[in-house]
Image (tube, rainbow, N blue to C red):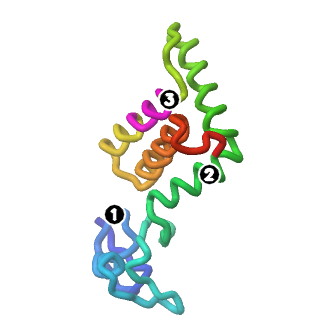
Amino acid sequence: MNSKTCRMCGKLFQSNDETVCFPCWSSCCKGESTTTGNVKKTSTYIVESTETKIKLITETICQEADRVVSGEKRDSYGSVEQSFEAIAKAWNLLLHIDFIDAHDVAMMMIMLKVLRENHSAKRDNLVDICGYAKCASLLTNEGNAST
């Protein structure tokens, strides 16, 4: 373990990879407020830290997934229906089968992310699980598949 300076309170603490000491981290998660400079952090924020930065997250996992599926991913990859149908065709060709459909792709991607989360827990895995669940819902006509 190395001595680090907490990016919120400035106190020294021992850690290999965190940039925020436990008291500061837990105060953010318990609803207490901490002030660093002119930034106030409360329970509405989740502190996600790396060696180089502290990222304050104000969206829930499901809100982030909804935003990504409805915006960034759609803009990059096209509609859920088109994208997942193309993946299903490619997997069918690769595996010399003809029964995987777009909904199966969403379910298999959820399984992939569950396995990754089991190996190494990360917020991104949970966001992706929610996003793929939304895609599966859209593909079963519970929503608008063009999202």
How crowded is the residue under tag 1: few (<14 C-alpha within 10 Å), some, or many (20+)?
few
Q: Which residue is tagged 3? A: 105
* 52 sits left or right of 110 in the view: right
Mark 1 vs 3, N-terminal side: 1
From this view, report whether residue 67 is shown above or below residue 119: below
Highlighted magenta segment, given as a residue range = 104-111
Horizontal and vertical percent position of residue 81: 62, 34
* Disc 1 residue type (three-letter): Asn
Q: Is residue 147 above or below residue 92?
A: below
- Indicate left or right for 95 with 89 as reference: left
- What's the CA distance linking mark 1 and mark 3? 38 Å
The outermost residue toward the front is 142
Q: Verify CB contact (< 8 Å) between mark 1 and mark 3.
A: no
Residue drawn 33% across the image and 63% down it = 16
**Secondary element at image label 2:** helix
Residue at point 29% right, 72% down?
Answer: 14
Q: For the residues marked 3 and 2, what is the alpha-carbon distance in whole angstroms?
A: 18 Å
Query: Residue 70 bears which disc, if any?
Result: 2
Q: Residue at x 47, y 27 (%)?
A: 104
Q: Position of residue 74 (x, y in %)?
A: 66, 45
Image quarter where the N terminus lies is: bottom left
Label ID, residue 63? none
**SS for tag 3?**
helix
Real-space Cα separation, disc 1 to disc 2, in angstroms: 37 Å
Q: Main secondary structure of the magenta part?
A: helix
Tell me which amino acid carries mark 2: Ser
Residue on which disc 1 sits: 16
Kind of residue indicated by mark 3: Val
